[in-house]
Amino acid sequence: MTPTPVRTTARLLAGPPPIRPLDRDGFLDTARAALRSRPVLRITGPAGIGKSTLVQALADEARAQGVTTLRCAPGPDDSLLPYGALVDLLAPVGPESLARLPAEPRAALRAALLRGPEPTDGRDRLALRLAVVELLSGLTADGAPLLLVLDGVHWLDRPSAELLVYVAHRADPLGLRIVSTERSGEDPPPLYPPGTLELAVPPLSLSGVEQLLAQDAGPGAADLPVRLLRQIHEVSGGNPSYALALAPHHPGSRHPDDRHPEGRGAADGPYVPSALRRRLLASAAGLPPQTRALLLLAATAARPTLDLLRAAGVADPAAVLAGPERLGLVGTDADGAVRFGHPMQRAALLDDATTRERLAAHTVLAELVPDPVERARHLALATPYQDAALAELLSGAAASARTAGRPDTAYELAVLAVERTPAGHHADRTDRLLDAAGFAVDAGMHEEARRAAESVLATPAGPADPDQRVRARLVLLETAGQALGDTRGLIEAGLADAIGNAGLQARLRLWAAVRALLGGSTATAAEQAARAAELAALADDRSTRVSALGLLATVQAMRGTPGDAEHTLALALSAADSLAGPADDRSLMRRQALAELDADQVVEAHARITALLERSQARAGVEDSLATLVALVRVQVRRGECAQALATAERCGRLLTDADLPSPLAAYAAALAETAAGTLDRARAAAGAAVDGSTADGDRLFLIRALGALGTAQLLAGSPDGAAAAVESLQRARELGAAMELADPDTVRRLADLAEALALLGETAEAAEVLAEARSLTAGWTPPWGGGALAALERAEGLVQAALGRIGAAADALSASAERLRGLPLPLELVRTLIAWGGAERRARHRVVARAALTEAAGICRLLAAAPLLQRAEEELDRLSPGERVRTAMELTASEQRVADLVSAGATNREVAAALFVSVKTVEGTLSRVYRKLGVRSRTGLARAADIRGHELFTDRARDTPLMRGVRTS
């Protein structure tokens, strides 16, 4: 007799509340898919990586879906207890279920579960297997789902392991699923049948570690310096257990400097608690003293090698390290580099050493390492005393590290220089603290930079001189990002301190220009930039003069005076050529590239930006690198390098994640790339994030650009809802741009998109006004400046004509746009024009011309992998199929057809206006054209025409669109 299936009991459902694992969504998605298709899933990973948390999450989800779940979680002591895991696994199964088993298997199972005497006939092993299979079979009867969770198979006792091997190999016929966890490097029982999928648990990302500490490590974790957070992530290797142990505010972490972990010193990473050190180094306890000393030397070196250890006096370091290598503590690569099994082992060795041992190791390395920067670092750590000569040496080494593109190392050395500066040397100490702040800015460590600058401004003893206070305020300006709205007081206080110092005044005026530009005043920005250039010339500060002239050229271009911009940019380039040394101005190179982009010299702009990345990225700070990458995305999109634009946008995101810097720039880059090659949904989401970030920062200039990206992504959806949303976004950008007096090609392109969206909604009169405004902005342009923007205007004019039913005029304008674009390297703009042209010709029933234009557009999209535009082209081509329904004797435009559909269904003019996001006046005008084309005089005649001619003006499909839901029908 088949036992009655046991349904989920209260005990099966009991347990901790559902767990939401951090940073593991992708892993859980893969695990869920595996459990749907395979009987057994094997999850592996090192201790503390979060295996139990993940299987608990899977079990919680299964229970919530009504799946009976049995779970065992043996520990180290349980491996010696026969059937201990089986007892744990079947504990929720009640006695009534055992009672339904045949007598002999029931007796064997009761004995194993310590619920009855052990059988004496010697067949208990086979009977026990049959009993467990019969019991599980009953639980899955009638298709009832069952999940076995074996959390820690490396601790299974041998009898339970043998039994579960038997069950696992029969999991599929039994209709059950098994998920197990196993520690990497262990030798578990052969539990897994063929087809088992193994998933290794990935480490947490930096953001995952941050979330973990904020969630579990106490309220102080939110105040951790970004640098310490990055060190915790690096040393823990993304292992959640290790990361928690390293957090200074976690209950398991105890050390004297608990409240100020960064006070351990610039060179020190997170502290490894003694209990964890003992566990990590347990295998090394029996190693000879010489071997442990060599391990400490390797742990102390930044890049340990066999050659370095041999130079330290060890004749055969490979032989000495053979023992630790067998224990998994270290390994040696083919090039002789020595690496540790896990970064935690290296950190544990350093924290386990005495102060004397660490000083000795640094002393040895200071004599041996060939890199002068690294040598200075070891010398400082070997001499933990204030010393003026050492501080000077460290300051020079920090500058060398920065020049070599190592801002993190430069910051560390600069802080060491501050610590080694004698107490009475106030001016030197302040200068070095400001140097450290500057290096922190380069490394993206804005929190550390601000702390250093604020300490200079707040020092009660040995106050900073006026020049130093200005430098501190300049650091605070640099770390403000795009949010410069609240920095007016900093600039004014700085100018008061900088009286008599033209160089410092020039730098502050330059920041005032940037602040004015982001705040929405191009006139003030131009005035301040020109003043900054004059002051820089007086001070012979050529670098600041180059930056000021470059900014002034950019503002002049934005205001639609390309001749002035070209002249100013030439002055900036001349000044840059006169600079001594290789200190090229990266900002100026970007401005050159973007000026070339305005002139549609896309190939030249691409070459310049690429050269900038290749030549100077190693020396560039985080924000400078980000600005260059965003510029590259803009160029790639205009050039039609769609896949490359997506990859570059991803680099922007990674750069910000690594530096832990918020910025809407990366979201803007993602929006541009997704519109070209990804999905419009993701493009709209990214553009929305850029809009929100720019709004929060008070950055009006970038807000306009983000709104433009959002409007384009909304418009390309091709729907009335999308067009209405695009009008809202682009109208907002129009108003902001007018307030800023913008008249550059980007502004004209945004206005062209706005006119196109209005035409799609049938608002042709307002669209014409927008086009007239755009044309007025181009009056001061000189070729080849803005050719692509003029083509966009011609495209929009053609679409407005098409919306008015003037197909001949529409075709002429769209043909002119295409002809202009064929002479420019702007393939995606050409595609947009071809799609518009094809659609207009289709409505005029010029099928041959329409098909040619749309086929060309689709071919370009396929070549460039421009997915969103390809979809639009294919949708238009589908409407040209031989079976396409002929709707009217004279084809209605798209906006006319939508109005006719709604009116023929019984909607009032006001309801049509609300549904299409247009005015009632526009509906009335459109309806008049529909009556005229169809030869009718009323709504009744419109409905009758649809019935008599069989034109199906209102299809079943149209009735089911979101547009019609809620509109009254008769």
Image: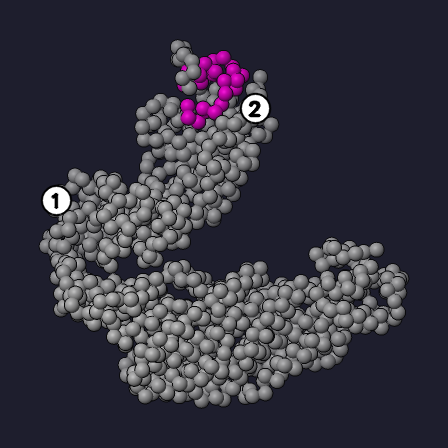
Viewer-closest of 880 and 599: 599
Q: Residue at x 52, y 27 (%)?
A: 10
Residue 353 painted magenta: no
Residue under the point 40% across and 53% down? 207
Q: Is residue 620 above or below residue 380?
A: below
- Dominant secondary structure (helix, strand or loop) of the stretch shown in magenta: helix
Mark 1 belongs to which amino acid? Pro
Residue 122: x percent and y percent?
39, 13
Q: Is residue 942 left or right of residue 778?
A: right
For badge 2, the amino acid type reads: Pro
In the image: residue 937, left or right of residue 250: right
Mark 1 touches mark 2? (CB < 8 Å): no
Q: Is residue 619 left or right of residue 707?
A: left
Quarter of the image that includes the N terminus: top right
480 or 774, nearer to the observer: 480
Q: How far across and down, in percent of the image, does residue 826 sit?
A: 55, 76
Q: What residue is shown at x 33% (from left), y 87% (from top)?
A: 537
Q: Would residue 166 be seen by someone viewing this image from the given angle?
A: no
In the rendered structure, find residue 289 and report the number of the disc placed on it: 1
Label 2 crowd bin: few (<14), some (14–19), many (20+), radius 10 Å? some
Helix, strand or loop at label 1? It is: helix
Residue at horizontal 59 percent and vertical 87 percent from the top: 779
Dividing the picture into quadrants, the one containing residue 140 is top right
**Residue 26 position in % (x across, y down):** 47, 49
Q: Quadrant of residue 476?
A: bottom left
The quadrant of the rendering that contains the C terminus is bottom right
Q: Secondary structure at mark 2?
A: loop
Please say if 133 is above or below 415.
above
Residue 99 lies in magenta, yes or no? yes
Q: Which residues are magenta?
A: 87-112
Write down the residue under mark 2.
5
**Can residue 825 be seen?**
yes
